[in-house]
Amino acid sequence: MTTLYLIRHAEAEGNLYRRVHGQYDSLVTDNGYRQIKALEQRFRDVKIDAVYSSDLFRTMTTARAIYVPKGLPLRTRADLRELSMGEWEDRSWAGVDRTDHPMMRLFADSSPDFLAPGGETYEEIRRRGTAAILDIASRHDGQTVAVFAHGTIIRHVLAQFRGIGLGREEMSKTQHSDNTAVTKLEIENGQVTVVYSDDNSHLSQEISTLAQQHWWKGGARADVNLWYRPLDLSKAAAQDYYAACREDAWRNLYGNLDRYTGRGFLADAMTLSRSDPHSVWQAMFGKEPAGILQLDPTKDARERAGYISFLYLNPEMRGRSVGVQLVGKAVSVFRPRGRDKLRLVCSEANETALKFYRKYGFRITGTSPGAYASLYNMEKYIGYEYRGELD
């Protein structure tokens, strides 16, 4: 008999930014590294003979919780990857729902008819995942193995082992696993016993991903998911919206409009927008404007940095834990351009913004002069490097 621990990866960018990351190679978040430390403690006294993971960064990084302290090699397999989402990869969930709502409905219902353009079906991932787990078990008879994979493939493999079919009614018998949740299987001669599943008892409420989100619960309460469109500053209405956002941000920070140069801000944004249509974005919640993300693709480009000039949320969107989704959009724009860090400046007087940026991985690297107070230069690493030194 083989004892097999099937473990979901730690919190990754897609979980936090609310973007479609199937086989897109996303990073682990700062909170994800805290989850990895908790997982390491859980398995401290558990004997493990071999460790496998998918060949994506988020699973390989999570697997360090076991293979590093136990001095084992990591064996990677592409057949443990998440469901391929094809052309949906790295789009916002809200953006996909807006343009492909019927197919998104099939996705949510776990329908056998679901297929993102260029992606995989649920039946395909079941076959792939089941074959991978049984093959690993056959190679380790009499041993204990840890296997790191992804939420959707784990959910559907477990459904297959339990004889649960596809479709909304059938899959409602299953549950969604938290990041780093653990499932224990006992496998003998191809027969699988699920000892327990989706256990996240090693996570506190403060670092549990699902404890902070609502999409998986159903019911009326839902998370706010944003989508984005370029802000067309050639139109007067867009100029008025941009100017109002800039003025509100200045007034909230300084309490007045002294030294405010609204025309200068607008002129800079219009110049950026003309030179690169992916530099000024309007965040949308449904049909309503939710904020602005302004990027400068040229500033600090030689240092492989992507610069955020302005990040703003409308008043009604504040306090709803959605600002980080704009950071995710910045990552989505800059990473394909070869940038491995994000940079911005934040007034030392803006304690709310400083707390937000620090929470989501920005570090102070220096200071610059500002209108009233010094500005902190801040930076967030977005490259593929292990960041286990984080608290």
Image (tube, rainbow, N blue to C red):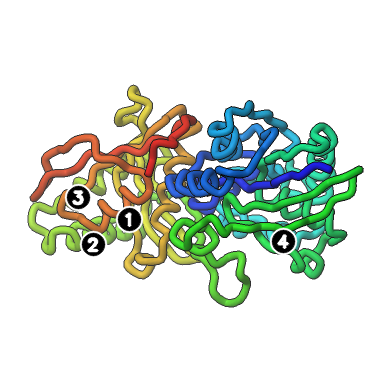
Please provide percent x and percent y for residue 123: 83, 50
Q: Which residue is mark 3?
A: 263
Tell me if I can see residue 25 in this picture.
no
Label 1, residues with CA under 10 Å away: few <14, some 14-19, many ≥20: many
Q: Residue at x 50, y 42 (%)?
A: 28
Separation (CA) of disc 2 from disc 1: 9 Å
Please provide percent x and percent y for residue 244: 27, 61
Label 2, residues with CA under 10 Å away: few <14, some 14-19, many ≥20: some
Location of residue 57 with respect to 171 vertically, above or below: above
Q: Earlier in the sequence, mark 1 or mark 3?
A: 3
Closest to the camera, between mark 4 and mark 3, is 4
Question: Residue 248, which numbered label?
Answer: 2
Q: Secondary structure at mark 1?
A: strand
Tell me if I can see residue 194 in this picture.
yes
Question: Residue 102, which numbered label?
Answer: 4
Q: Secondary structure at mark 2?
A: helix
- The image quadrant where one finds the N terminus is top right
Please identify the quarter of the rendering in which residue 22 is found: top right
